[in-house]
Amino acid sequence: MLKKTLVCSALCVSAACGLHADSIQLADKASLTGKILAEKRDQVILDIGYTVLTVPRDQIVKITKTGDSKSGTVVASLSPMVPTASPAFTDSKSGGYETANTPPPMKDVRELVNQLGEAVVQVRTPSGLGSGFIINEDGYLITNFHVIEGETEISVEVYHMKDGLLERKVYKDVKIIALNKFDDITLLKIDDKDAPKFSHVLLGDSDSLAVGDKVFAIGSPLGLERTVTEGILSTKTREMQGELYLQTTAQINPGNSGGPLFNMRGEVVGITNMKITFGEGLGFAIPVSLVKYFLDHRDAYTYSNDNPSNPYRYLAPPTRTTPTHTTPSTTTAKK
């Protein structure tokens, strides 16, 4: 009885509002029909007659705008409702990053680049430049250690979406929060007083990747900001110098260092950090599982300008069952 009353109310109000019908197809095959009042980066505002809904972008598969109805009657249909109060992501309390509660829908690269472009940044120092990505709205971002190694004067170039156009903004008050030289990861923070809330990315699961999965990178190779390259995951366990890396055919060049490697759901699955210089399609990325560990335990990697000896690398203590061997030094005399 209540459902019938609501549908009738929607019919009356929608017909009186300009006879305009737009359709939104949702990820769970449900759909909404009404009048789109506003389209924002992360949400769409839809008037379905008796109420106005805020629909998260990551729940939308397709938007169809039909214009004015010739019949003079517009039906606002509400196939099973997706509760807007339930967020599509969850905060990691210790690490300050976000991951998806449920896997976001698969999209093509063009859609994802438009969605994620604001969160990928260029990191500059007096000695060079690299890339990075923002992990929360407060301006915390990840890049490679080697991008900022030996530097404290750091600036970050961000592209903000304004009136449908990207606007370049350079932030010069950037602090080093934590770093791990051994895994080549650094956490920075944009601390400018006029800094807004930042668009940011979700961290995915590198363990769930399969060889052959499509991936893409966004970065600033040779300073060419916002460059997108697409490829596949060649292997998940490429061993180099005692560490395991993701290997990808997505083109990686100097300047991509510190940038994100995305899956086709728009989640970061790695940090691009090196390539084979004498080959093509041989790029490498640090698995995002290491990034999460670094962020979850960032107190152990905290950087302080007052103490150049930190952060410390804590090693496992020796056990009684494992003797410590000492190799005497040897000297070779020249003849």
Image (cartoon, helix red, strand yellow):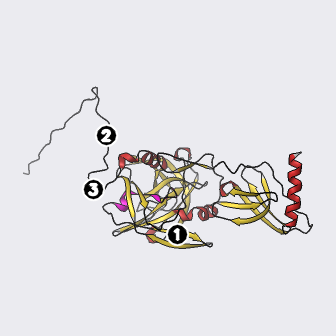
Query: Is 328 covered by the magenta stretch?
Result: no
Distance, label 1 to label 3, CA atoms, is: 32 Å
User: Percent position (x, y) of residue 240?
Assistant: 39, 49
Binning the other alpha carbons within 10 Å of mark 1 as few (below 14), some (14 to 19) or many (20 upward) gives: many
Q: Given the image, on which type of amino acid does mark 3 rest?
A: Asp
Q: Is residue 314 left or right of residue 144?
A: left
User: Percent position (x, y) of residue 225?
Assistant: 49, 70
Instruction: Please state the extent of the stretch shown in magenta in the rendering.
Output: 134-148
Q: Given the image, on which type of amino acid does mark 1 rest?
A: Tyr
**Quick one: label 1 or label 3, which is nearer the N terminus?**
1
Q: Do the residues labelled 1 and 3 touch (CB within 8 Å)?
A: no
Residue 258 sits above or below residue 317 on the image: below
Residue displayed at 46% across by 57% down? 140
Binning the other alpha carbons within 10 Å of mark 3 as few (below 14), some (14 to 19) or many (20 upward) gives: few
Query: Is 137 covered by the magenta stretch?
Result: yes
Q: In this view, does 56 lie to the left or right of 160?
A: right
Distance, label 3 to label 2, CA atoms, is: 23 Å
Circle 3 SS class: loop
The residue under label 2 is 315
Which part of the image, by quadrant, shows the N terminus?
top right
**Quick one: label 3 or label 2, which is nearer the N terminus?**
3
Q: Given the image, on which type of amino acid does mark 2 rest?
A: Leu
Residue 320 sits above or below residue 237 on the image: above
Which residue is the extreme one toward the top? 321
The residue under label 1 is 159
**Quick one: label 2 or label 1, which is nearer the N terminus?**
1
Image depth: mark 1 or mark 3 in front: 3
Q: Do the residues labelled 2 and 1 touch (CB within 8 Å)?
A: no
Image depth: mark 3 or mark 2 in front: 3
Mark seen at residue 306? 3
